[in-house]
Image (cartoon, helix red, strand yellow):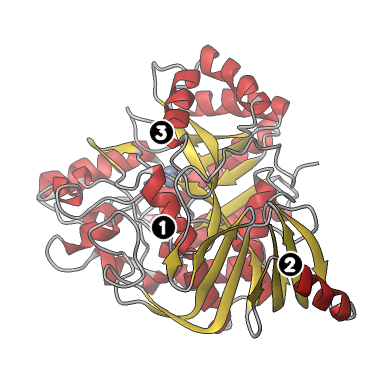
């Protein structure tokens, strides 16, 4: 099967070029820039089908390197399965996800990983890979890190938050970083001072401050900035590469910027919720409504200027990636577990479907360039986690994961509108954004076209990854 995506403008971090893209089977066979128009026309005549991309952008399928399908959390599970979550991803132009397999204290890493394979195998609409959460750093799990790298799981997530559940103390972090410095794995860090936060949470509950907004007020920016600085220091000491996940506080991002300026292999990721939403407007919504936006790190106060600063850090490459940290919970029965006690609200927001549109709005609003949009949402996450150039670029030999994006289109977000995630609400309800994901191909198969989902579960394949391609 050959498909010619004709007449569009191909966007890469390096620029925007008018070009036709020829897909042969699962890969890109040719990218025909102006000057080879005659050749393109000939190919069009020969291709089994032509997708007209005139007036539209042609992008590499987006790569969301931070999702949590079916994550067990707070006595419940993230509400998207690999089937529903990857289908929603496809609707939004994301053709690769990297999800987090979980190992808890006392469990074998290999067992946690096997459980994640069992959840995802045969279920996914788009290609997928795994990071490994290590919730119990000990001799055995450290030894398993070498096996993980050999198996293509080249990044591990550690937590400085959630004492008694996932938290690693500084000694454990140091040991994991020493291992990563040796075997090349990327240390992904949830950087919040969980021990201090737990004290603030207990004090708030004792005072009777139980509403959702207290989730944010008991995790002030200092707890994020301190943990970020500590993680950077331990990475410097050990020589480990470090990637700070879901960054929300401008002071924490400043720590990453300073480490990068000093030449350290430190990277930062943020998410759409930290760019658009805030503690005052969402988390402090009346009654229990704010529970919809309980996530960690928390939404931060707009009055403190975090959102604007994060956009700026994205522009200057001090922050390198926008992922979603997709971790959806329904309002009814799941978020409601925390009625009367904010600390029992399961942490997470669902956005896997909306990242490309939401960040394109940053282009429309003049915050980032078109090229940077593709870099943040596709090229850099692919490179960061060893998937490039198979993913993240429109180039000969790459997987034919393509998005035809209509800049003149419009997307209305909400449960009854463009919402295919397994949630009974949308954290983005009422958002009206410019641009629209028109057509989505995954390895040469059309998944989305004319407002219809044409994919199937099981199309998505597991991807073994190489080491991060930002390290020397
Ligand atoms: O609130 C969040 N972020 N839930 C998902 C788990 C995590 O820490 O990333
Ligand atoms: Zn986290
Ligand atoms: Zn996460």
Which residue bears the numbered disc 3?
119
Front position among marks 2 and 1? 2
Measure how far apart labels 3 and 2 are at the Cα level.
37 Å
Which quadrant holds the C terminus? top right
Which residue bears the numbered disc 2?
47
Regarding mark 1 in the picture, which secondary structure is present there?
Answer: helix
**Is residue 309 visible to the viewer in this orientation of the structure?**
no
- Which of the two residues, 106 or 28, is positioned nearer the viewer here? 28
Q: Is mark 3 within 8 Å of ligand 1?
A: no
Which residue bears the numbered disc 1?
88
Which of the two labelled residues, at mark 1 and mark 3, occupies the earlier sequence position?
A: 1
Q: Which residue corresponds to the image point at 22% horizontal and 55% vertical from the top-left? A: 214
Residue 193, x across and y down, in percent: 41, 41
Residue 96, x across and y down, in percent: 56, 51
Which quadrant holds the N terminus? bottom right
Measure how far apart labels 1 and 3 are at the Cα level.
17 Å
């Amino acid at each position: 099967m050959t498909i010619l995506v004709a007449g569009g403008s191909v966007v890469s971090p390096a620029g925007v070029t008018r070009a036709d893209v020829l897909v042969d089977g699962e890969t890109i066979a040719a990218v025909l820039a102006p000057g080879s128009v005659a050749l393109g026309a000939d190919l069009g005549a020969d291709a089994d089908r032509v997708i007209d991309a005139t007036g539209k952008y042609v992008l590499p399928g987006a790569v969301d390197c931070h999702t949590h399908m079916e994550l067990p959390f707070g006595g419940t599970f993230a509400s998207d399965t690999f089937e529903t979550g990857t289908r929603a991803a496809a609707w939004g132009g994301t053709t690769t996800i990297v999800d987090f397999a979980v190992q808890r204290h006392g469990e074998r890493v290999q067992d946690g990983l096997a459980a994640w394979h069992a959840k995802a195998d045969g279920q996914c609409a788009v290609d997928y890979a795994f990071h490994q959460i290590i919730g119990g750093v000990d001799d055995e799990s450290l030894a398993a890190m070498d096996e993980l790298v050999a198996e293509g799981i080249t990044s591990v997530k550690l937590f400085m938050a959630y004492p008694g559940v996932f938290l690693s103390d500084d000694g454990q972090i140091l040991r994991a970083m020493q291992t990563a410095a040796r075997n090349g794995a990327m240390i992904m860090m949830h950087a919040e001072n969980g021990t201090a936060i737990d004290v603030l949470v207990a004090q708030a509950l004792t005072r009777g401050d139980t509403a959702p907004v207290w989730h944010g007020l008991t995790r002030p920016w200092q707890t994020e900035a301190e943990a970020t600085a500590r993680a950077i220091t331990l990475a410097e000491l050990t020589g480990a590469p470090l990637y700070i996940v879901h960054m929300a506080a401008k002071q924490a991002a400043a720590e990453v910027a300073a480490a990068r300026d000093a030449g350290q292999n430190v990277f930062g990721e943020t998410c759409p919720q930290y760019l658009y939403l805030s503690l005052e407007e969402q988390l402090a919504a009346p009654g229990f409504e704010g529970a919809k936006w309980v996530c960690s790190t928390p939404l931060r106060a707009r009055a403190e200027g975090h959102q604007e600063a994060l956009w700026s850090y994205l522009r200057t490459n001090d922050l390198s990636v926008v992922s979603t940290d997709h971790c959806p919970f329904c309002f009814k029965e799941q978020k409601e577990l925390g009625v009367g006690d904010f600390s029992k609200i399961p942490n997470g927001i669902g956005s896997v479907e909306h990242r490309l549109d939401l960040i394109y709005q940053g282009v429309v609003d003049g915050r980032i360039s078109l090229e940077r949009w593709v870099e943040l949402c596709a090229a850099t996450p692919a490179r960061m986690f060893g998937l490039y150039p198979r993913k993240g670029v429109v180039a000969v030999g790459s997987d034919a994961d393509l998005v035809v994006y209509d800049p003149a289109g419009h997307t209305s977000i909400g449960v009854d509108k463009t919402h295919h995630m397994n949630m009974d609400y949308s954290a983005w309800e009422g958002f009206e954004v410019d641009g629209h994901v028109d057509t989505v191909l995954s390895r040469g198969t059309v998944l989305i076209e004319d407002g219809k989902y044409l994919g199937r579960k099981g199309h998505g394949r597991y991807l073994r990854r190489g080491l991060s391609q930002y390290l020397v």
